[in-house]
Amino acid sequence: MTSYSLFYLLIAIVIIVFLIDSLLDILNARHYDDKIPEELSDVYPEDEYRKSIAYKKANYKFKMVSSSISLIIMLLFFFLDGFAWVDNIARSFSENPVIVGLIFFGIIMVGSDILSTPTLYYKIFVIEEKFGFNKTSIKTFFIDKLKSLIMMIVVGGALLALIMWFYEITGKTFWIYAWALVSIFTIAMNMFYAKLIVPIFNNQTPLEPGELRNTIEAYSKKVGFQLKDIFVIDGSKRSTKANAYFSGFGSEKRITLYDTLIKDLENEEIVAVLAHEVGHYKRRHVIMNLILSIALTGITLWFLSLFIANPLLSEALGVRIPSFHIGLIAFGILYSPISEVTGLIMNVVSRAFEYQADDFAKSTYDNEALINSLKKLSKNNFSNLTPHPAMVFIHYSHPTLLQRIKNLRE
């Protein structure tokens, strides 16, 4: 294969992935006005359902426009030798390959962030605002962007620098050391994310003593779940949408409730949601997801080690001097079809885990309380009640509301 043919292969992959995603969005949009199944007839009042359809259509149009703009920018970057231009800028600062790579990705990251900010701003302050979801202030929006950028530079830059350094000193076997590094980081994030990362963006406070905490603790004791911490996070600072999640494992496990969840649901419905989360822990889904994630990372890094030294990768992007950072860009595009397949498999596994967690909640608490909570959350988040089956199969990490209700009532 020549660099010329590889260049157009990369272009073809980018366009095909875009077309497949767009086709799925179009198919999904055609189901927005479908009749609601009988089991879901009580989720929305008629006026709210019309509003939810308008919300989905607004997001659909927004995504089609924004993704098309992103594709055009990407193609222009390819055809105008944008990667070579950024590479030349990076090389003007240093000859050290690690420093060059960091500067290269720094420019790409900052440039991408600047270009994506207007679309994100529009989504939050126009679409989310119009439909009553947005609670983010403009000040919070830009402070979040700054914090995210600093974290990406510090944490992402350190990881990337070490991986490139491994490559420089070990060659093709770098993937083993990189895999060990990423695995340690992944485990650490799973254990300490709620303690280290969440406080940067949100306030977390222990759930106050009272009926809700007593009910949660009684349920936890009943199912043999040693619960160390129950926290409430100020999700209402940014959105009216509600959520709850389980994080950590071992002595670091904790349950976090959004303040909006406490506001929207009754106590027994909140406990039913937590029973579902406890089900994930009891069925060892947290550990299994962690193992799968680490295994996929190892496979990806191994594939990367087979191609990264090939100068064709750099030549295809118009860069004269072969390098790890340019090879990584080309490999990322080449690997994207495989990523789509592995993502699909992970979604299939995730949906199976969700059914198992629902079954645990059903057997240890109350299936109707969980159904009521799911209906309320779907209503309050304007969830799609009639998604296209292809969209569900490829992109949904959770079963649809209808599928979950049928499973809970079997």
Image: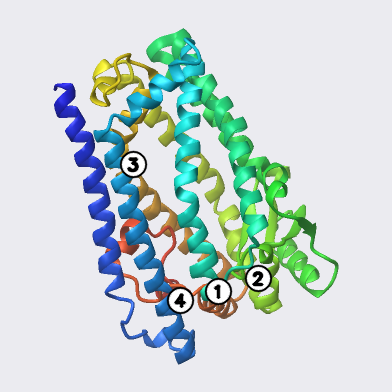
Number of the front mark, 4 or 1: 1
Question: In the image, what residue occupies the spot 58% across and 76% down?
Answer: 373
Q: CA distance from mark 4 to mark 1?
A: 13 Å
- Identify the residue under disc 1: 377
- Identify the residue under disc 4: 405
Q: How many marks?
A: 4
Question: In the image, what residue occupies the spot 49% across and 84% down?
Answer: 43
Residue farthest right in this picture:
209
Asked whether disc 4 touches disc 1, contact meaning CB atoms under 8 Å apart, the reply is no
Image position, residue 227 (x, y; %)? 74, 55
- Identify the residue under disc 3: 339
Which image quarter holds the C terminus? Answer: bottom left
Image position, residue 329 (x, y; %)? 35, 30
- Identify the residue under disc 2: 261
Q: CA distance from mark 4 to mark 2?
A: 20 Å
Asked whether disc 1 touches disc 2, contact meaning CB atoms under 8 Å apart, the reply is yes
